[in-house]
Image: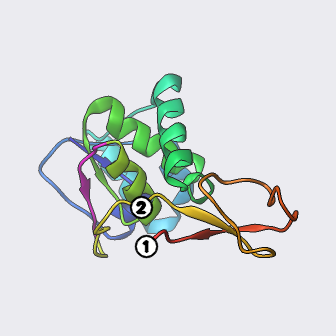
Amino acid sequence: MRVLDTSAFIHEYTTDDAVVSVPAVHDELEGETALRFDAMEGSGMTIHVPAPEVVTTVERAARGSGDADELSETDVRLVATALELDAMLVTDDYAMQNVAERLDLDIEPIARDGITEAREWRFQCVGCGRTFDEQRERCPICGSDLTRKNPA
């Protein structure tokens, strides 16, 4: 089973495996791509709403990796669906791939290369330069904004 992100419909992804998506993906599509979603739903694609506790697990994993601010609600629900159904996640979104990797989910990229390594982002203060493991609103030392930083 494969969980399809918006990019799967944009790039006309096809597979012989069973497919599933979430209702919010349809809301992100327009025109011909929205019709593709409708056609796949009409031909047997399952529409799934993940359980709240699974969504919470994904949100926790996203905070742990530093990707929480990069993921939309739709993204979180897609990863949660893949986790809940033990399915492969089909997406080109690097933040989704990073969180999925952290949760030991299989990933299939579509039009771009997938991630080559999972990352746990750090956050650096633009004012004083200190780094932190967790995302915060502002630097607790000087009050400046924090930016996401590659730990490598």
Q: In the visual, does 120 lie left or right of 101? A: right
* Residue 128 appearing in the image: yes
Classified by dominant secondary structure, the portion drawn in magenta counts as loop
Mark 1 lies on residue: 152
The kind of residue on which mark 2 rests is Arg
Measuring 34% from the left and 43% from the top, which residue is drawn there?
41
Q: Measure how far apart labels 2 and 1 are at the Cα level.
A: 9 Å
Q: In the visual, does 53 lie left or right of 85? A: right
Q: Between residues 75 and 106, which one lies in front from this camera angle?
A: 106
Query: Looking at the image, do the residues carrying marks 2 and 1 touch, with CB atoms under 8 Å apart?
Result: yes
Q: In the visual, does 52 lie left or right of 7? A: right
* Residue 22 appearing in the image: no
User: Measured along the vertical axis of the image, is residue 20 above or below residue 56?
Assistant: below
Q: From the viewer's perspective, is the residue at label 2 or at label 1 nearer?
A: 1
For label 2, the SS is loop
- Mark 2: few/some/many CA within 10 Å (<14, 14-19, 20+): some
Residue 119 got which mark?
A: 2
Q: Quadrant of residue 69?
A: bottom right
**The magenta segment:** 104-110
Q: Position of residue 66 (x, y in %)?
A: 55, 55
Is 105 within the magenta?
yes
Q: Between residues 130 and 27, which one lies in front from this camera angle?
A: 130
Q: Position of residue 113 (x, y in %)?
A: 28, 75
Is 100 within the magenta?
no
Q: Between residues 132 and 59, which one lies in front from this camera angle?
A: 132
